């Protein structure tokens, strides 16, 4: 019963995060990528280039391409095609089209293209990091990657990167060299921002605490912080005195609270703290 409640709460949390992240991605694409013609890959990049040569807006083209790819995903994978990916794809597809209707734009928000490039990179990259971290994707070219993986032995990462480079080159030809160079910078920076964001989202603190009186510390970890701990006996190499070692893994704010507690109550305790961005288990990631 408790396990079902945990899964239900986790699903609600995930869909709230998907909605927030999708909104951030749509804002980054519509307000910063589209008006500046930043074409650094993906469906939004293709849409920007095609909108320059077709009688349609980037939002309309973005919607059409994403819906076609979504239908291909269902045709190829059927029921196996992810509900999460479908939900996110619909939000990201219809979002720019809705904004075109309510907030029409005839140019960039500011006259600072570098500043707008930063937002065009950061907002969608942060959203992508949230999706990847929760086991979903924003659809688009990710669906193409899934199809390629199923039917071919193509190096998907290389194929998608090359397609992104082609879009950047087209941006140079369709718009101008400056737009193409901005798009190239965006393409190179996007993956770095995604990787760094994922690592920071998952960052946890791994504690190794060596002390003489473990009971108060363990109680604080379990009762006040709501986390578990592993306790075992050890012997100091120098004085051959019996010590207790406590192992626990905490989120960043909890780590600060535990450090302050130990300093107040057992200032002689030895604490080693290690950063970790990949913790799998109950209370962290990968618990089913």
Image (spheres, rainbow, N blue to C red):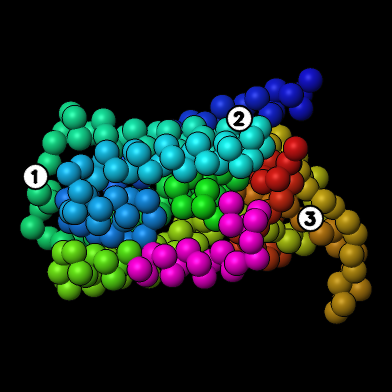
Please state which of residues 185 and 275 is positioned toward the viewer in this rendering. 185
Instruction: Mark 2 and mark 3 in contact? Answer it, CB < 8 Å.
Output: no
**Label 3 SS:** strand
> Nearer the N terminus, badge 2 or badge 3?
2
The reply, left or right, for residue 240 in relation to residue 159 is right
Tag shown at residue 106: 1
Give x and y (percent) for residue 146: 59, 52
Q: Is residue 30 left or right of residue 156?
A: left
User: What residue is at 55 percent from the left and 55 percent from the top?
Assistant: 145
Q: Quadrant of residue 79?
A: top right
Question: Label 3, on which residue?
Answer: 246
Q: Is residue 237 left or right of residue 113?
A: right
The residue tagged with tag 1: helix, strand or loop?
Answer: loop
Residue in the image at 30% along x and 67% along y: 168
Q: Estimate the x, y position of residue 130 in percent, counting from the top left.
A: 49, 47
* Residue in front for this viewpoint, 60 or 196: 60
153 vs 114, nearest the viewer? 153
Q: Is residue 49 visible?
A: yes
Q: Residue at x 50, y 36 (%)?
A: 71
Image quarter for residue 22? Answer: top left
* Residue 22 visible in the snapshot: no
Q: Mark 2 and mark 3: span between their CA atoms?
A: 32 Å
Q: Is residue 21 magenta?
A: no
């Amino acid at each position: 019963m408790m396990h079902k409640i945990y899964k239900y709460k986790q699903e609600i949390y995930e869909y709230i995060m998907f909605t927030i992240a999708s909104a951030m991605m749509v804002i980054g694409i519509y307000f910063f990528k589209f008006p500046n013609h930043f074409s650094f890959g993906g469906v939004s990049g293709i849409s920007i280039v095609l909108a320059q040569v077709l009688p349609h807006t980037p939002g309309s083209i973005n919607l059409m391409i994403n819906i076609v790819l979504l239908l291909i995903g269902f045709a190829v994978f059927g029921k196996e095609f992810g509900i999460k990916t479908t939900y996110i794809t619909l939000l990201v597809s219809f979002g720019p089209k809705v904004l075109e209707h309510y907030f029409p734009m005839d140019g960039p928000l500011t006259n600072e293209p570098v500043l707008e490039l930063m937002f065009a990179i950061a907002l969608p990259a942060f959203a992508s990091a949230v999706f990847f971290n929760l086991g979903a994707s924003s659809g688009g070219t990710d669906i193409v990657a899934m199809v390629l993986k199923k039917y071919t032995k193509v190096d998907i990462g290389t194929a998608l990167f090359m397609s992104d480079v082609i879009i950047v080159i087209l941006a140079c030809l369709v718009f101008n060299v400056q737009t193409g160079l901005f798009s190239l910078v965006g393409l190179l920076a996007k993956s770095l921002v995604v990787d760094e964001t994922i690592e920071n989202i998952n960052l946890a603190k791994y504690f190794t605490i060596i002390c003489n009186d473990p009971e108060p510390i363990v109680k604080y970890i379990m009762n006040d912080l709501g986390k578990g701990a592993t306790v075992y006996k050890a012997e100091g190499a120098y004085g051959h005195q019996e010590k207790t070692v406590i192992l626990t893994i905490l989120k960043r704010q909890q780590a600060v609270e535990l450090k302050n507690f130990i300093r107040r109550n057992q200032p002689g305790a030895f604490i080693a703290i290690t950063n970790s961005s990949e913790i799998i288990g109950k209370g962290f990631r990968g618990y089913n």
